[in-house]
Amino acid sequence: MGLVLLRHTKPDIADGICYGSTDLKPGAKFTSEADAALKILPWKADQILSSPLLRCARLADHISAAHDTASTFHSGLKEMDFGVWEGLRWDNVPIDELNQWANDLLHARPHGGESVHQMQQRALSVLEAEDAWRNDTATLVVTHAGIIRAVLDHAGVRDAWVTQTPYGGGWMISADKTVTALG
């Protein structure tokens, strides 16, 4: 079986805004985007884990109904808390702060929120506690781009921290640790 990491659909916010842990509802095209996300799944999920933020929870509930499988929501699967950057346009974030973050991506916290390492550890802790890596279970994780990168990095994917995952797209990590893009 394996693990599928699925990114939420497009949220109701303008492009170019840093919104990490901000709770946003899904955008106007939610239903068609959720139906498209459902179609890329390689199997019926035995277990659905999700961030509780609305943009993920709504998608998890949509898939839950289609798969007749309950969703379990974990705050550890939320996107990174970007502190004072939350709600700013990315091009308005001070360049010296962005440079500080780029120079120590895993540990720098120039925004006052959490570090990438802290985010990764809390997400991996949830997956471990839920036994999401079991080979005999089809586990779906509905979450955010940052969490997806963190899990891909843990799985040994080269350049995981710059990997792009489209809204409603995802990645499958099979039992033999093969990673495949979905959508």
Image: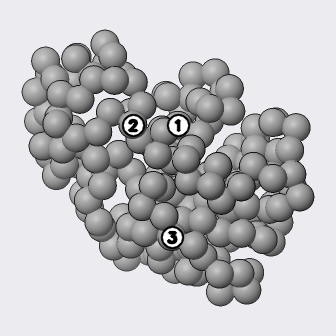
Q: Is residue 15 left or right of residue 61?
A: left
Name the spot of residue 79 as percent of width and height, x first: 39, 51
The kind of residue on which mark 2 rests is Gln
Q: Residues within 10 Å of mark 1 (few under 14, many from 20)?
A: many
106 vs 1: above or below: above
Q: Nearer the viewer, mark 3 or mark 1?
A: 3
Residue 66, horizontal then vertical, whole percent: 70, 84
Q: Would residue 73 be visible to someone looking at this image?
A: yes
Badge 2: residue crowd in 10 Å (few <14, some 14–19, many ≥20): some
Q: Which residue type does callout 3 highlight?
A: Phe
Are circles 3 and 1 on residues that touch, CB within 8 Å? no
- The amino acid type, in three-letter code, at marker 1 is Ala
Location of residue 183 in the rendering, given as x and y in whole percent from the top left corner: 67, 53
Which residue is rendered at x = 89% and y = 58% of the image?
Answer: 136
Q: Circles 2 and 1: CB distance less than 8 Å?
A: no
| Cα–Cα span, label 2 and label 3 | 19 Å
The residue indicated by pointer 3 is 73
Measured along the vertical axis of the image, is residue 55 above or below residue 161?
Answer: below
> In the drawing, what numbered circle is on residue 118?
2
Q: Outermost residue, front direction? A: 129
For the N terminus, the image quarter is: bottom right
The disc at residue 150 is 1
Q: Which mark is residue 117?
A: none
Q: Residue 10 versus residue 171: which sits nearer the camera?
A: 171
**Residue 103 at x, y percent in the picture:** 31, 13
Which one is closest to the eye, mark 2 or mark 1? 2
Q: Nearer the viewer, residue 173 or 40?
A: 173
Q: Is residue 73 above or below residue 40?
A: below
Residue at the top extreme of this rendering = 103
Q: Earlier in the sequence, mark 2 or mark 3?
A: 3
